Image (cartoon, rainbow, N blue to C red):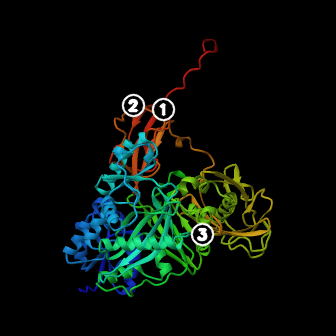
Amino acid sequence: MRRDVIHSLLVANRGEIACRVFRTCRDLGITTVAVYSDADADALHVREADLAVRLPGAAPADTYLRGDLVVAAALAAGADAVHPGYGFLSENAAFAAAVQEAGLVWVGPPVKAIELMASKTRAKELMAGAGVPLLAPVDPAMADEDNLPLLLKAAAGGGGRGMRIVRELGALPGELQAASAEAASAFGDGEVFAEPYVERGRHVEVQVMADAHDTVWALGTRDCSLQRRHQKVIEEAPAPGLDDSLRERLHEAAVAAARAVDYRGAGTVEFLVSAEGRPYFLEMNTRLQVEHPVTEAVFGLDLVALQLRVAEGEPLPQPEPPQPSGHAVEARLYAEDPARDWQPQTGTLLALEVPEAPGLRLDAGYTGGDTIGVHYDPMLAKVIAHAPTRPEAVRLLARALERARIHGPVTNRDLLVRSLRHPDFAAARLDTGFYDRHLAGLTAPGPGDPATAALAAALAAAVRRTGLAAAVRPGSATGAVQPGALTSAGPPPVRFGAWRNVPSGPQLKRYRGEPDGAEHEVAYRTPRTGAPEPYDAPGVRVLAVRPDRVTLELGGVTRHFTISADPGADRVHVDTPGASYTFTALPRFTDPATHTDPGSLLAPMPGTVVRVADGLAAGAAVEAGQPLIWLEAMKMEHRILAPASGTLTALHAVPGRQVEVGALLAVVQEDPAPAPVPEETA
C-alpha cells in the first residue's frame, strides 16, 4: 500500500472551513497554503495560513471554482496535498482527478465514488441495488393530483439550490422551469427530478469514515431538521428520539452505501425519516459536512486528522469506532435578517466574541474588523456546545449565543437563541417545517427592554462627549455624586449669541433600533457638578457611568450595560447579559430629502441582478405580487415583487449589474381605484 506523507497542504476553499483545516494542520506540523480571491485579500483564512496564492477576480466562477488555477496555486506554493473543504469544488470529480494527475495527494474520496454520487438520480439507482431504502421517483410528465405534494430537486449539487415544493398541479410546469434554471446557474447542470414530498419529515444523517483497508465506521447520527430554504441552521448529535432499531437500520444503510462505491475518507449519508419512522435515502455527500463538529465532540475525534491519515494511506486507528459520549448541538451564525425573508447582510463586522466555557467551541471564518461581502455564503461562524445530556448542551449553547458580542450587520443570533429555547425543540419535536410554522413568533419583538438600553447609550454618549471617564460610584443615588468620582469636570457651558446651551437642562436624544426601526426618545440632564442622569424616569438609579459601561438599578435590581460606539458613525451597540441592541442616533429633525417616490422598488440588499421578468419594460402592466426582478446575493436568489397592480413607469435593473442596498430598481405606478358607482345607478 502506497504511503504519502503530507508536509504541505493547500485548502481549496475559504472562510470557516479553511481556518478549521488549518487548525488541525498546525497541530500535526503541516505547512498550510491558502488561496484567495481579490475580495478575500485580507480574509481570516489568508491571515492564518503560512502561505497564500491569489486567484484574480472576485466572483466564485472566476476564482474558487477554477480548478486549473487552484492546482497551479498548489504547485507554485510547493504543496504536496489538496483538501477541498466543503462547497465549491469539493464534490467535483474532474477537479479531484486533476489534483492527482498533477502529482498531488487528494484529501478526499476516490474519483469514481464522487462520480457515482454526483448525480442524485444515478446515486438513487445505485443505492436501490445496495438495498438502501428509497422514495419512489415520480415522472413530472405523468404526475397527477395523487402524487402531490412533490419535491423538485437538482440532480447535481445541493444546499437547497434548484429545490421546489409543488402543492398544486398547475404550478408544476413553472416550478420545473425555475428549478432547472437555478440548478443550471448554480451547478452547470439543469437536470431536475421529482419525488414525493414527505410532510413533517426529519433530516437525519450518518457520518461515515472509511479507509483503504476495508474498514468503514458509522459515527452515529445527526439531526439537521431545522432548515431555512433547505439549508441547515441548527444540527445536533446524536439525533434525538430515534429507537435503537431505527438507529441501527440507518447505520447499516450508511455503511452499505459507502461500501457500494468503495468509499474512502469522510462522507455523510443523508436520510429523510417520516413521521412514522420510515427512513429514505436522500443523497451521499462525498466530503466533510459543515456540521461535522458535533460528531467530533460526541466521539472525541478530529475528523480532519482522520481524513489526512486516510489520504496518507494509513488505516483507521481501530476496526470499530470509539464509543460516543454526551450530546452536542451546533448553531450556524449567519449575516442575515430572518424577519425580512432571510435577506443576507453585508458590511463591516465590528465585533464577534463568544464567551469561553468548558464544552463550548467556536469555528469562525471572520473576526472583528473583517468585511462581509456579497460574493459568498453569509455564514460567519459555527458555535458548538457539548455536554453530558441534550438539555444541558442546548442550555449551554443558547446562553453562549445570548452573551456573545456581535456588532455590525444584522445576524440570526436572536433567532438561534429563541429556536433553542422553543418548546418544540426542547421536546425534540423536530421536522423540516419548523421555521415554516414558527418563524413569525421567533422573529416577533422580544420581551427585552430597548428603551432602557437606549437610555444607557445616551448616558454613555454624554460622558464620552464631555470627557468624563467615570461619573457615579456604585451605591450612589441618581445624581448624588460622591467626592472624587469625576476625573474631569468637562467643558464649560457653550454659548451661542443671545442664548446658551445649558448642560444642566434636559437634553433629548433620539435613537432608531435595528433592525425593527422602532424609535426611542431619551431625556437626561447633566448637573454642573455631577454625572448625566435620567430626566423624569422614576424608579431608575444611576450607579455608574463610563463611556463603555453603564450600571443602573431598575426596580431594585442592578443591571449592567456594555456600550460600543462605531468609530466615525452614529451607531451604538448595547450588550446586556440577556439581550443585545443596536441603535442609530437620529437628528432632531427629519430630512425630507430621504423620502422616495411611491411605488419605488429598492434593492433590499447588495447583490447582482440575475434576470428580469420576460418582456418587462417601461410601460408594461404588472399585477400585485408578480415577480419582476431576481437578485442574487450570498448564494441566495431573491425575488422583487410588484407592490400593487399598475404600470411599470421605470426599469433600472439590468441583468448582470451589481447594485447596492437601497438602489432604485424600478417604479410601479399603482392603478387608480375605480370611481364609486352612484347609488341610483347601482
Which quadrant holds residue 230? bottom left
Indicate the quadrant where residue 243 lies: bottom right
Q: Earlier in the sequence, mark 2 or mark 1?
A: 2
> Nearer the N terminus, badge 2 or badge 3?
3
Q: Is residue 93 above or below residue 22?
A: above
Task: Count residues near mark 1 (Cα–Cα under 10 Å), then give few for <14, some for 14-19, many for 20+.
Answer: some
Local SS, label 2: loop
Q: Residue at x 57, y 69 (%)?
A: 401
Q: In which quadrant is the N terminus drawn? A: bottom left
Of circles 2 and 3, which is in front? 3
Residue 599 place in picture, x, y as percent: 49, 36
Query: What residue sits right under mark 3 in the picture?
Result: 398
User: What's the distance in space between the residues labelled 3 and 1, CA to CA?
Assistant: 44 Å
Q: Residue at x 22, y 70 (%)?
A: 97
Task: Tell me the amino acid under the disc marked 2.
Answer: Ala
Quadrant where the C terminus sits is: top right
**In the rendered structure, which amino acid carries the disc numbered 1?**
Ser
Q: Which mark is residue 645?
A: 1
Residue 481 lies, with reference to residue 672, above or below; the image says below
Q: Which residue is mark 2?
A: 620
